[in-house]
Image: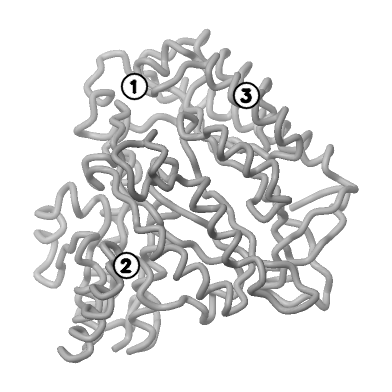
């Protein structure tokens, strides 16, 4: 079977798409949409713009190929399956919970093979199995993502992902450990833990704060221990990276781990802010205010001076005044972010924010976004300048580049092989 996987959206989607591609690659050939027998479109619907891109991607797949089955999965499919199935009889929507089984069926696996794989998973006690095959072929020679959590129990007023993904769930720690050990034994040097609300990870216990529960920091400590010696002599062990984490989930245990792990847990956090105005944060239903966020950043900086900190900020949220926006700029400067992902607010039908009457004019959003992007560039340059001349372990990528622990792309030595983790002097400038 010729197949093509089209991915849209977040890093969790990327991992899910890679898993689907790995399974299909074991039974077919990855190709262009035009030549595929099966096209898998993993969709995003986090904003109105994301929904538009998703619909465009599905229509493009149908136009590009007049015979392929088009399998639509992901958040947009969960919210409006009828729309996508109404586009063409070749379209089939499938939920994330059954994506693996459906892809396996469409890969023409025998019934016996499916039964054997399902029995093996059941014997392991796995409730989730986001990576049935190790993804170590072409395109997976550097870092790999491991999905450990899904869903979200928050309900930010601009977001519909909690509806599309459902309640927060977590994979069993034993299952995560087995997968990460397999990657480390295969020579992978960076594993990125991902989730829709990664910081809510919990295996066991009765609540988030139950001391009997395995939370994210404890999971990482266990991963560090079991992989500490799974590397060749003279090479560093595998390192772990946290993809994104909400401010409320950065506890003392995680801060202590970042400070003590000597870079095996990358001293880089993506800590979404969304707004520097406490008024706007309340209206977004974010569970913190600007002062709490600033205090957390100060605590992190004091305990982990090497920390690189990136964030998301939405500009033009309904009712955002110029004063509110200036507060976002001020807090961004105070936090000295290494990168700001700037998102002009995009109305998402079905969310409380979308029906507000005080929508910000498009031209105002555009101006604020441009201003914030300029600040982001300035802050990034300043953060890198204080690192230039120091040393960091960097993961060698393709095209003779390497990604540092602090998440900067720098030149790699000409003889460095992709996938290697090497100690490099940071040059005076980065990409």
Position of residue 262 in the picture relative to residue 98 (left or right): right
Residue beneath label 3, please?
Answer: 332
The quadrant the N terminus occupies is bottom left
**Left or right of 301 on screen, residue 6:** left
Q: Are marks 1 and 2 in contact (CB under 8 Å)?
A: no
- Residue 158, by quadrant, is top left
**Residue pictured at 39% horizontal, 33% vertical:** 209
Q: Find the residue positioned furthest to the front.
A: 212
What residue is pinned by disc 1? Answer: 285
Expressed as whole percent of the image width and height from the top left, the position of residue 276 reads 53, 18
Report the residue that reaches farthest toward the right: 389
Q: Nearer the viewer, residue 365 or 225?
A: 225
Q: Can you tell which mark lies on residue 73?
A: none
* Gap between marks 1 and 2 measured at Cα: 32 Å
Q: Position of residue 92 (x, y in %)?
A: 15, 67
Classed neighbour count for the residue bearing mark 3: other residues with Cα under 10 Å, few (<14), some (14–19), many (≥20): many
Relative to 284, does residue 324 appear above or below in the rendering?
above
Quote the CA–CA distance across marks 3 and 2: 38 Å
> Element under label 1?
loop
Q: Look at mark 2 in the image and give the residue it sits on.
A: 129
Q: Look at discs 3 and 2 and give the one toward the viewer.
A: 2
* SS at badge 3: helix
Please give the name of the residue rendered at 18% of the width and 47% of the height, measured from the top-left corner: 79
Of callouts 3 and 2, which one flags the residue occurring earlier in the amino acid sequence? 2
Q: CA distance from mark 3 to mark 1?
A: 20 Å
Residue found farthest to the top: 323
Question: Residue 307 placed where, x, y %?
Answer: 70, 39
Q: Are marks 3 and 1 in contact (CB under 8 Å)?
A: no
Q: Residue at x 51, y 81 (%)?
A: 137
Location of residue 171 with respect to 359 vertically, above or below: below
For this view, does 124 lie left or right of residue 250? left
Contact between marks 3 and 2 (CB within 8 A): the answer is no
């Amino acid at each position: 079977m010729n197949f093509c996987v089209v991915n849209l959206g977040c890093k969790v989607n990327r991992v899910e798409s890679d898993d689907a591609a790995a399974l299909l690659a074991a039974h077919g050939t990855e190709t262009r949409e035009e030549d595929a027998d099966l096209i898998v479109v993993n969709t995003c619907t986090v904003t109105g713009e994301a929904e538009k891109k998703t619909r465009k991607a599905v229509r493009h797949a149908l136009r590009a190929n007049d015979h392929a089955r088009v399998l639509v999965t992901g958040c947009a499919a969960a919210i409006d399956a009828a729309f996508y199935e109404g586009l063409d009889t070749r379209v089939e929507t499938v939920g994330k919970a059954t994506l693996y089984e459906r892809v396996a069926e469409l890969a023409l696996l025998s019934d016996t093979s499916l039964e054997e794989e399902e029995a093996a998973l059941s014997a392991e006690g796995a409730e989730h199995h986001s990576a049935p095959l190790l993804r170590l072929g072409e395109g997976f020679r550097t870092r790999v993502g491991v999905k450990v959590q899904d869903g979200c129990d928050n309900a930010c007023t601009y977001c519909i992902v909690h509806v599309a993904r459902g309640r927060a769930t977590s994979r069993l720690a034993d299952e995560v450990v087995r997968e990460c050990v397999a990657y480390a034994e295969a020579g992978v040097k960076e594993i990125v833990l991902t989730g829709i609300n990664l910081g809510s990870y919990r295996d066991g216990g009765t609540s988030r704060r139950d001391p009997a529960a395995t939370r994210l920091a404890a999971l990482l400590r266990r991963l560090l221990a079991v992989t500490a010696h799974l590397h060749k002599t003279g090479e560093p062990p595998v390192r772990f990276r946290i993809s994104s984490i909400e401010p409320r989930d950065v506890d003392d245990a995680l801060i202590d781990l970042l400070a003590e792990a000597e870079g095996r847990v990358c001293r880089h956090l993506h800590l979404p802010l969304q707004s520097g105005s406490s008024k706007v944060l309340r209206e977004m239903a974010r569970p913190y205010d600007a002062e709490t966020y600033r205090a957390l950043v100060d605590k992190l900086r004091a305990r982990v001076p090497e920390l690189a900190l990136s964030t998301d900020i939405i500009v033009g949220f309904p009712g955002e005044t110029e004063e509110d926006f200036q507060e976002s700029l001020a807090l961004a400067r105070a936090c000295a972010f290494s990168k700001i992902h700037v998102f002009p607010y995009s109305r998402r039908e079905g969310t409380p924010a979308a029906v507000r009457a005080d929508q910000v004019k498009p031209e105002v959003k555009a101006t604020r976004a441009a201003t914030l992007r300029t600040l982001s560039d300035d802050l990034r340059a300043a953060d890198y300048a204080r690192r230039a001349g120091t040393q960091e372990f960097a993961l060698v990528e393709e095209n003779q580049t390497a990604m540092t622990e602090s998440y900067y792309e720098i030149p790699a030595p000409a003889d460095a092989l992709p996938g290697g983790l090497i100690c490099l002097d940071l040059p005076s400038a980065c990409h």
